[in-house]
Image (cartoon, coloured by chain):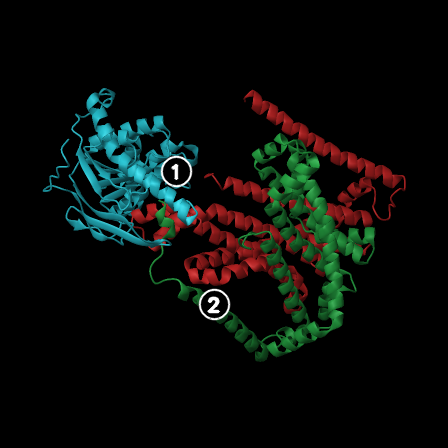
Amino acid sequence: MAETGRLTRAGEGRPLVSMVTLLRAAIILAGLALWEFLSHSGLLYRDVVPSLLAIARALGGLLASPNYYFNLGVTAAEIGAAIAIGGLSGLAVGILLGANPFLSKAFESYIYYLGPTPKIIFFPVMIMWFGVGPESKVALGTLSCFFPVALSVAAGMRGIDRVLIRVGESFRANTWQTVMKIYLPAMRHPIINGVRLGLGVALIGTLLAETKLSNKGIGFLIINAYSTFDMPRMYANLIVLFVLAIGANALVGRLGGLDSIKRV
Amino acid sequence: MAAGATKTDDAILVVDDIVVRYDTAEGPITAVNNISFKVRPGEFLSVIGPSGCGKSTLFNVIGGLLSQHEGVVSVAGETISGPHQSIGMVFQEESTFPWRTVIDNVAFPLELIGMARTQRAERARHFIKMVGLDGFENRYPGELSGGMRQRVSLARTLASEPKILLMDEPFAALDEQTRLLLGDKVLQIQQQLKQTTLLITHNITEAVQMSDRILVMTYRPGKTKRIVDIELPRPRTSEIVSSDAFGHYVAAIWSDLREEASRGMKDEESHVLHEGGAS
Amino acid sequence: MTATANRRNSGNLAAKAVGLAFLIVCLLIAETLIRADAISRYIVPPPSEIMGSFYRIVTEEHVARRFLLTAAECLAAGAMITVFGIAGGVLMHRFKLLQQACETWVAAMASAPVVLCYPLFMVIFGRNAWTIIMIGFIAALPPVILKTIEGLAGTRKVLVNVGRSFNLTPMQQFWKILFPAALPTIFVGLRLGLIFALINVVGVEFLINYGGLGQLIEDLAERYDLAGTYAAICFVILVSVLFFMTLEKIERWLRPVD
């Protein structure tokens, strides 16, 4: 049935797009209105729902203060290091497991089952091993990041069309060439997807560690706002964090050419 | 070969002047262009044509799944404007419900009309036996082969006791041997029930073996190229299938089809050349 | 069993044995290095001591009660994501406009660090179980919604056509065809959601020092009970892994169709 896939009905098209935008705008406006109402209604404990104006002011103050960018830099550096170490080790282990069925059968189920576990509980151990500075946060981020990358890469390795490998063999490519010129390009999608997932969990792990024990970084700023009960500042921090996290996720996904961010 | 004598008076299915047009990215297309024919009660009519001739579109129109068309389809005098209880459809793809057992699949139409449970089970067993799957009532489709699953779909449609059985290349996904065996089975059932059957197919041998008449369609826009009366005795044993008369019919229909099929092929090739992609 | 199957099975067994042996060897090496003071036992207790603490932890620290508390929190979050997640997915599938407007938002939430809002939730709900449950709920909701939509939308067209050919009403079409066809995918979503819920529940318990198993670790760490902390971490990881395995088994059992 070749033709049926491209059926369109006459008259539809343009208007439908802006309906979506209208609905989105309506939902956002309704949400903001509800928020403002709750804020002034006194129904909830005083500053739990600050007015939109207060949040906006805190947001402005935050984005204008150099102190914020210092902390942002600290966190970004920690996350970057976590992804670098965790990502590269995950890549290496994933390639190893993906290429060698025996090793995969021996070890991969450990990684598979240890992956979806709460890594933050390792933080006390990380502190003992690496001290109270940024190293322990990087360690936790690395631990979190390793698993999704290793599993994605291993699965990606196995998913490569065998015939491509044989082509490399027929041209007598050595191991390094095979890895660089065939395996890695063929695995671009699983690798990027693994990195995207790894980024997400590294971010969470690092930040949670910062909220637990740190005097620097975004996590510290959030818990600090909590302990001083500066709610507008906490909301502002959370808003910026969410925007950055979702943006980074979308960016990495786009980089990898993923068709949508709906992959869970 | 008679050129499609249509005995009109006692027709149970009347397809009158069907035209189907729709818009695609490349502009408006006419899929089916003025097809008309009549089917008598108990008759086995095959519609044969090359890929892309619109026969599946025709299947959807007659079945009531496609209502945007010109022309009229009527069953026993009543005009069809949507899926109708007197038309039973068997689809080309896997269509059994994987979450229901065989007997629950077959009993599905009986469930819909509110038949009592014990009665349903009994009726369903009757049709399961008819397609030769007795013993498999409590299995899941996932445990069965492709051919067995198509038999379940067939039994399910038969259980609704339609006046007209409409089938769209039901054996296309099966291997040759299974197809032949299933074809025999369908024919046997059709003769036993005196079921009016309309079969859409691209397989000439199958069509000649099973049908009373064959409607040959042209390539898109699909029109009636020829209606052929198959005057071979029933039952259509393997003797008859290997007879000269049979061979003549097949050859004649192929010469009609070949023309249309090569037109279709050229059209596909020019598509790739000009639009830069296969349709 | 055929000869090839037998060979394959013994190959699998050999690999698994090697994997296990490797782990044991690592533990033995760690034990030796620590006892030899190459690694300070005040940073990493010897594995034998950790294993010894297991018994102590289980008996002295009311592990059963803690486990039940964590389980109850997960169950609460799980019940909420089942109800709201599936309902949300069904609604978004039913109202295409809603889906087009909101699906990307839900997907964005799936990648957002929801758990970082725990200080906010502490302000709203207090330092108690509700904070934990709500974080678990919100963090685990997106995959359930997304998988429900995916399952319903992914119903094979021919099955929809079968329903149409029998002239089913929209309600019948939904309950007799779309929903059963979507169930396997919905269960995948629930499995993902429940895992997220557990991870977040235990994590928040640890962070706010309240609750069951997560709080146990925090407690032992604050008491500088080194071996106990390590043992508790291993225990919680074990519970988590068993939970994951159980969910997988349940999901496989519920899928007679594949």
Q: Which residue is mark 2?
A: A21
Residue A151: numbered disc: none
Amino acid marked by disc 1: Thr
Host chain of mark 1: B
A183 in relation to B16, above or below:
above
Q: Which residue is mark 1?
A: B101
SS state under label 2: helix
Name the residue: 43% across, 33% down. Answer: B143
Query: Which chain comes out cyan in the rendered image?
Result: B
Disc 1 crowd rating (10 Å Cα; few below 14, some 14-19, many 20+) is many
Host chain of mark 2: A
Question: Viewed as shown, does residue B270 lie left or right of B216?
Answer: right
Image quarter of residue C48: top right
Q: Residue furthest left?
A: B9
Q: CA distance from mark 1 to mark 2?
A: 45 Å
Q: Residue furthest right?
A: C37
Q: How many marks?
A: 2
Disc 2 crowd rating (10 Å Cα; few below 14, some 14-19, many 20+) is some
Name the residue: 58% across, 39% down. Answer: A159
**Residue B121 appears in the figure:** no
Query: Which chain comes out green in the rendered image?
Result: A
Q: Colour of chain C?
A: red
Question: Viewed as shown, does residue A94 lie left or right of B59?
Answer: right
Question: Viewed as shown, does residue A89 lie left or right of C6?
Answer: right
